[in-house]
Amino acid sequence: MMKKRIAILGSTGSIGTQTIDVLDAVGAEVAALTGNRNVKRMEEQVRKLRPKLAVLSDEAAAKELRIALADTSVEVCAGEEGLRRAATMESAELVVTAVVGMVGLVPTLEAIAAGKDIALANKETLVCAGELVMQAAQEKGVKILPVDSEHSAVFQCAQARGENPLAKIILTASGGPFFGKTRAELASVTLEQALRHPNWSMGAKITIDSATMFNKGLELIEAMWLYGLPPEAIDIVIHRESIVHSLIEFADGAVLAQLGLPDMRLPIQYALTYPERVPCKVPHLSLAEIGKLTFFTPDEEAFPALRIARNAAGERGNACAILNGANEAAVDLFLHDKIGFLEIPELVERALADVPRCGGLTLAQVLEADAMARETVYSAR
Ligand code: NAD
Ligand code: MG
């Protein structure tokens, strides 16, 4: 296989570090790395991978990194401009988008405009501006390769579809740390409990999203854009073991699934080697050892996030950008112990009720909806 040249946006995070962990298997070379303020980890990554460009969004941290790397020829940049440069590096053909949140949107659009294929982990990008991103990718003829495990599962299964359309997508959800709890019980759960995910070790924001089930709501919207299906054709099923990563259904009722241990390195690697497959570090699955797989209907009374996301998805326009911005702000408040767990969906619903809708959707309208949604949430506190 030819050595792939890639840029990793968000290389210091959970997906970023796991991407670096599969680089040897993939045979990829790194042109640029970006992080937020973790100087030490970025310095280690730069010394190991020798990219041309290293970016830290935080100005002070970037200054520190520049001093730490003074003995190298690696260029160090800061801020949004740095992120954009990393996304459009001439020497990269593929960009892994592993930053968290809608800050990933503009760099992703710029990477697409520059003709880069995208290995997409940053789901918030598709949630707030799926239409713009998919349209831009189509116009430019670049691939959007899903990294999210459920969407990778759908993508992998879909390789077997030939000319047949998908009748349905079935996304699996672990149910998170609070599966089985009633609404009354959820009123008193703590931040510490919410951060303890049973099956996956991930960044803080997505871990809270998994606890509220907004993660699955965001993934429903992500799947809608990636596969061009209406929200009604996307089902959610709780699957506690996180072994079946998702399924597709055809017109005749046949269902295909992709299975494996819960480890992001496989979907990350497949996005980087597609359409080829190469050996992966992840231990192989032993079904007999797993023993049994269980499935349940989600409890939308205790976890209203699914219903809220499904409604926003059906609306199109700027509703999903409002939902995403409000959720990012509410999760931020929860992570800083400013609100209780049940207030997260309440604040998202309030933003959806208060922020005005618009019909079409430009980038400026997405950014405006996002800003207004955040403002609604922060000012409610
Ligand atoms: P994380 O918090 O571990 O890492 C986030 C990365 O983004 C870090 O490199 C951080 O430095 C950078 N970052 C944070 N704020 C930034 C800002 N304002 N400007 C620029 N860079 C910033 O998050 P993660 O768990 O790796 O998740 C990354 C994305 O991948 C998210 O969109 C998440 O939903 C998605 N995802 C993650 C997993 C997982 O297993 N971790 C699985 C599926 C999808
Ligand atoms: Mg997922």
Image (spheres, grey):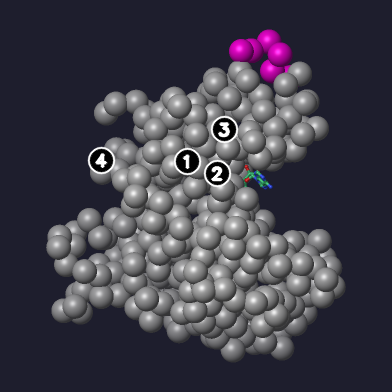
How far across and how far down the image is residue 24, in percent? 41, 29
Q: Disc 3 marks which amino acid?
A: Arg
**Image point 81% across, 61% down: which residue?**
336
Residue receiving disc 3: 85
Q: In the rendered picture of this protein, how many numbered marks are placed on residues?
A: 4
**Which quadrant of the figure contains the N terminus?**
top left
Q: Nearer the viewer, residue 364 or 8?
A: 364
In front of the other: 379 or 305: 379
Q: CA distance from mark 3 to mark 4?
A: 29 Å
In contact (CB < 8 Å): disc 1 and disc 2? yes
**Label 1 belongs to which residue?**
111
Tell me the element at label 3. Answer: helix
| Residue type, label 2 | Pro
Q: Which mark is residue 276?
A: 4
Q: Amino acid at mark 1?
A: Ala
Say which element carries label 2. Answer: helix
